[in-house]
Amino acid sequence: MVDYACRACNALTIQQVAEYGKLRQVTSDCRLLVQSGELSECTSCGLIQKVVSTRMSRDLMEIYDTYQPYEHDLEPLIFSSDSVGSRSAGIFDEIDSSFSIAKTGQLVDVGCGDGSFLNEFKRRRPDWQIAGFDLNQNRKSDIEEICGEGQFFSGSPGDLPNKLDLIVLNYVIEHVEHVTKFLHTLFEKLSSGGMLVAMVPDLARNPYDLIIADHLSHYTKTTLISQLEELPLMCCRQALQKELIVFVGKGSRNRYRRSTTPEAEQAGAEKQIRYLTKVRTEALDLARTYKGQFGIFGTSIAGSWLSGELGRLPHFFVDEDQRKHDITHYGKKVLSPCAAPTQGVVFLPFTRQVADKIASRLGSVSPARLYVPTGL
């Protein structure tokens, strides 16, 4: 039996979480899987992670060979009670509000995908020199159209230009196996006052992150700080609705000291799996009761996973994004909230805090009953 070291603290103290195999999984681009990879938890630092075995490595290669950042090329929108905006705009605002982005500089977006963030950055800071880096070269021409010829990089991050003022990693670190080595390579590419910014899902606020097959690390604020212990971390805080954002500065002397992991986080994996299992049970019961009048709110990770768990039970989707109302998801209709059937129920697969906000926002719009899962 091979002993694997923790991805964050390097201790040989990771233990497999047995119940994980009973849940279906989805890829981060919302394709359904039966099961891929085993979940483990480090008893030293608390990081919940997937070990990259030979089989897991093969599965990841298959996922990324046909990877599409956004279904139908529609970047997710962020909804609130009084506004709606693109996720890229929200990330730009998070960075700019914490450390004002200069008028000029040099940026590389690592894991640039289809270039959504690069497009937003170019619109907001047109005098910057910008470039994209991605292992997948399918969007090379799209990125060069945004950034200029020769401004798309692939292969090794060590081949990136030096003296970069800003390196952004939006939803990247959780996909990386050798995180510490990867981040140190990028850190050395910064200018003397440069900054590295990373956005990752926050498991504490989003238990559905566990069922994303190609996410290798599932971070809380504590475990993310532990992962970045050797770098000069300037700030680590909650961002957007369900994310964490970190800022690492080349010229900064500020360092977060790793603290003892709270006991509650030590048992995090089992707690989150119990939550997901109960959500699945509630959804199955309702789908059987409402027989064709059962809807799932959202067509991203949580909604896609729940649809897979329902199997052949009839259901539809509801989404606030008007761009999705003329398309289907998994061959099923996507309705606007106001088009949900009067005698139906729409399940909100989110934590109670998020689901309550959605129910409050749409309660007077949807003719169907909006169901907030009880979870734990």
Image (cartoon, rainbow, N blue to C red):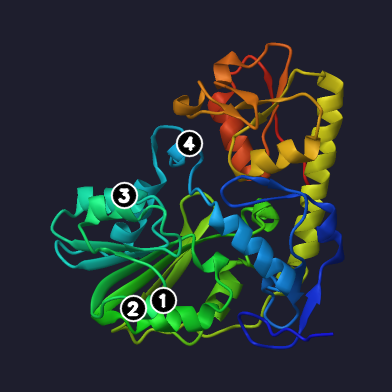
For marks 3 and 4, the one nearer the N-term is 4
Q: Nearer the viewer, residue 323 or 232?
A: 323
The part of the image, by quadrant, that contains residue 215 is bottom right
Tell me which residue sits at (65%, 32%) in the image: 330
Q: Nearer the viewer, residue 41 or 35?
A: 35
Q: Position of residue 7 (x, y in %)?
A: 63, 79
- Residue topped by disc 2: 159
67, above or below 348, in the image: below
Q: Position of residue 246 (x, y in %)?
A: 44, 69
- Residue topped by disc 1: 156
- Residue topped by disc 4: 72
Tell me which residue sits at (51%, 40%) in the image: 71
- Secondary structure category for the residue under label 2: helix
- Left or right: where 363 falls relative to 59: left
Mark 4 is surrounded, within 10 Å at the Cα level, by few (under 14), some (14 to 19) or many (20 or more) other residues, namely few
What mark, if any, has residue 142 been given in the picture? 3
Tell me the kind of residue under disc 1: Ser
